[in-house]
Image: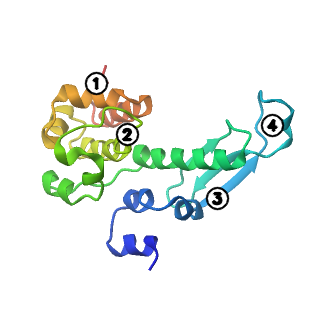
């Protein structure tokens, strides 16, 4: 049984199935387009199709990477961006009671939230799993930051500081809050 079948037999939500796949398995779910990137980079950049666009068929997300002159490096960057996009864009429904749903969530231990510590940097491997869970809980709590903080066992200041660590995460949190008529976080 491969990893995809193993994960789907456990009946996990979509994002969790996708984020726990290996790079090869995740790439197999994507349409891969290569093209010539425009812009600076000299003669070599204009002659090789090194830019990569990934279209994740199950979620519909599209990511690109075109910084490097190496198609291999751009593909690796695009895969990392796809994983981040999955955490930012794909919400998993949290059942009530929230505490029980969190404890049974596969990303709960990987995120560091089980020890009531929020990652302090985007570069930490726990950051994006934590961000995904926090956005899921924010949706379940109808955008109320204080309820999310209480549910996670952190202060509202710690939670807001965490959300500020990445501009796209901050934007997504504000988008969720706006859906429920709350003012933007500042």
For mark 1, what is the residue? 183
166 or 43, nearer to the observer: 43
Q: Which mark is residue 124?
A: 2
Residue 167 image offset from top left, x and y in percent: 43, 28
Question: Residue 186 at what x, y percent from top left?
Answer: 31, 19
Position above or below: 109 against 51:
below
Q: Write down the residue under mark 3.
A: 31
The mark that comes first in sequence, 3 or 1, is 3
Which residue corresponds to the image point at 37% horizontal and 39% vertical from the top-left? 124
Rounded to the nearest angstrom, the CA distance separating label 3 from label 4 is: 22 Å
Image quadrant in which you'd find residue 56? bottom right
Assess disc 3: are there few (<14), some (14-19) or many (≥20) residues with their C-alpha within 10 Å of its C-alpha. Answer: few
Label 1 with label 2: CB-CB less than 8 Å = no
What residue does disc 4 label?
Answer: 45
Instruction: Give the mark toward the camera: 1 or 2.
Output: 2
**Residue at 20% of width from left, 42% of height from top?**
141
Does dot 2 land on a helix, a strand or a loop? loop
Contact between labelled residues 4 and 1, with CB atoms less than 8 Å apart: no
Discs 2/3, front? 2
Disc 2 from disc 3: Cα separation: 29 Å
Distance Cα–Cα, label 1 vs label 4: 45 Å
């Amino acid at each position: 049984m491969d990893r995809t079948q193993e994960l789907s037999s456990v009946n996990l939500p979509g994002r969790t199935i996708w984020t726990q796949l290996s790079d090869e398995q995740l790439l197999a779910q994507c349409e891969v387009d290569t093209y010539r990137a425009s812009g600076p980079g000299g003669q070599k950049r204009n002659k090789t199709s090194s830019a990569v666009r990934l279209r994740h068929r199950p979620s519909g997300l599209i990511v690109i990477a075109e910084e490097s002159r190496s198609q291999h490096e751009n593909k690796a960057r695009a895969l990392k961006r796809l994983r981040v996009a999955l955490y930012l864009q794909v919400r998993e429904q949290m059942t009530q009671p929230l505490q029980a749903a969190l404890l049974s969530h596969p990303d709960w231990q990987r995120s560091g939230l089980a020890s009531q510590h929020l990652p302090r940097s985007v570069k930490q491997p726990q950051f994006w799993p934590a961000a995904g869970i926090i956005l899921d809980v924010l949706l379940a709590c109808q955008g109320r930051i204080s309820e999310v903080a209480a549910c996670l066992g952190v202060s509202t200041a710690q939670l807001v500081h965490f959300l500020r660590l990445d501009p796209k995460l901050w934007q997504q949190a504000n988008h969720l809050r706006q859906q429920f008529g709350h003012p933007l976080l500042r």
